[in-house]
Amino acid sequence: MTELIKELMPKHVAIIMDGNGRWAKQRGVPRVAGHRAGMESMKKIVDHSDKLGIRYLTVYAFSTENWKRSMEEVSGIFKLLVTFVNRDLKELVANNVRVRVLGDYNSIPADARKALEKTLSDTNEDTGLQFNIALNYGARDEIRRSVERIAEKVKAGELEPEDVT
Ligand code: FPP
């Protein structure tokens, strides 16, 4: 096996968590079982990225589009998030992994939001791998939120419209 050279590792690796549904279909198991397997792979990738000295790992876990899925599937995905935090938070802290969330996670189920908030605060001082979880993310929503912030600044007289680049 070829040796991996730590110095040549990319600084940032981003992964789209796709294919869970197809994985489940091929095996004749429920879609949520596919998401569970996806979560376990994600956990292994976090461990390996940390060991390989990768600086940032970003996973695209749940987009704004994903709300259109069945209630059973959506709630199954957020239950997995809670399972991950309950089971693995201690280990993340022990490994100095700092968890960040990208996207607007205010509207996710309350137990998942609480679990995430605990994760963010417990790992906030960590200086190792930064593990970004993109949740409830979407290009349209990101543009809307940026424009909203710009409009607020213009309204407050802090920014001139022609200064928007
Ligand atoms: C896409 O696969 C995957 C998702 C919509 C959900 C992935 C999220 C998790 C497994 C939970 C994440 C947990 C943490 C801690 C971040 P798909 O259903 O679109 O697959 P398909 O393209 O095969 O249908």
Image: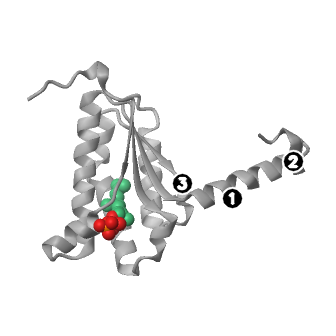
Q: Residue visible at 17% across and 75% down?
A: 29
Q: Is residue 6 left or right of residue 16?
A: left
Q: Is residue 123 above or below residue 67?
A: above
Name the residue type under label 3: Gly
Task: Residue 70: name its quadrant.
Answer: bottom left
**Mark sitting earlier along the chain (1/2):** 1
Q: Nearer the viewer, mark 3 or mark 1?
A: 1
The response on whether ligand 1 sits within 8 Å of label 2 is no
Which amino acid is tagged 1?
Arg
Cα distance in 3D space between marks 3 and 1: 12 Å
What kind of residue is marked 2? Val
Q: Which mark is residue 110?
A: none
Return the residue nearer the eye: 102 or 1. Answer: 1
Q: Which residue is mark 2?
A: 154
Report whether the residue tagged 1 is closer than 8 Å to ligand 1.
Answer: no
Which secondary structure lies at badge 1?
Answer: helix
Q: Which residue is mark 1?
A: 144
Q: CA distance from mark 2 to mark 3?
A: 24 Å
* Residue, disc 3: 103
Q: Residues within 10 Å of mark 2 (few under 14, many from 20)?
A: some
Horizontal and vertical percent position of residue 154: 87, 47
Q: Position of residue 46 (x, y in %)?
A: 29, 42
What secondary structure is marked by label 3?
loop
Contact? badges 1 and 2 (CB < 8 Å): no
Q: Is residue 164 left or right of residue 96?
A: right
Residue at (55, 66) in percent of width and height: 107
Residue 158 appearing in the image:
no
Ligand 1 shows up in the quarter that is bottom left
- The location of residue 83, given as percent across then percent down, is 29, 60
Q: Quadrant of the N terminus?
A: top left
Q: CA distance from mark 1 to mark 2?
A: 15 Å
